[in-house]
Image (spheres, helix red, strand yellow):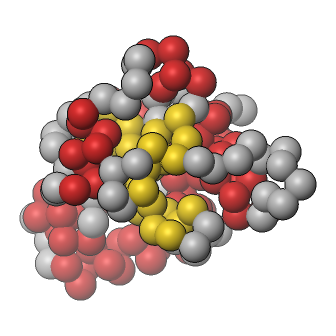
Amino acid sequence: MLRSPEAPDASPEHTALITLIDELRTPAFVVSAKGTVLYANRLAQLSYHGTPEWVSQACRESPQPWCKRIRVCAGSEAAYVCIPHDPVQVERLGLWVAEQWALPPRLALTAAKIIAGLSDRELAESMGITCSTARTYVRNVFKHVGIKGRSALIAEAIRVLHQ
């Protein structure tokens, strides 16, 4: 199990991950690559009794439409953050966040799709562009927002939501 961020031996990355998970307004689980729940935020604990099957499946199989997983490191092992997922709501939320950053329309859509968890390939397919163009859009979003990666973009989006 991941320990509380207040634990004396908790690394800054560990503390940041748990804090981020706790701030989500949706149930969220940190799950090992083998499907073992390492941490569940308060909403997950209140919403589910035990570990839902979709959480374990999300790490063993390709994710289902109702579950989103984000790969993270939890100490020395790879893990996933798993959340129930409604792509329409996540993309709508992403567009609102992108508007707060005053992104041009095409970059706003790109940011929303990144926040929804799409890979460069999925982004290209959904926008009808090449993977190379999708990567350029992604880099431009990161540059405009002033961050360096997808996880940082999602964390910044969460920060904007809590303002």
Q: Quadrant of residue 106?
A: bottom left
Q: Residue at x 27, y 66 (%)?
A: 119
- At horizontal 40% and vertical 48% (from top left) the residue drawn is 36
In the foreground, 40 or 158: 40
Q: Is residue 41 above or below residue 122?
A: above
| Residue 117 visible in the shown view | no
Could you tell me which residue is drawn at 51 percent across and 15 percent down?
46
The one of 58 and 118 positioned closer to us in this rendering: 58
Res 84 visible = yes
| 38 lies left or right of 58 | right
Q: Is residue 157 left or right of residue 18?
A: left
Residue reaching furthest to the bottom: 132
User: Residue 43 location, x and y as percent?
Assistant: 53, 22
Q: Give x and y (percent) for residue 1.
A: 59, 48
Quarter in which the C terminus is drawn: top right
x and y percentages locating residue 18 in the rendered image? 66, 46
Q: Is residue 76 above or below residue 30?
A: below
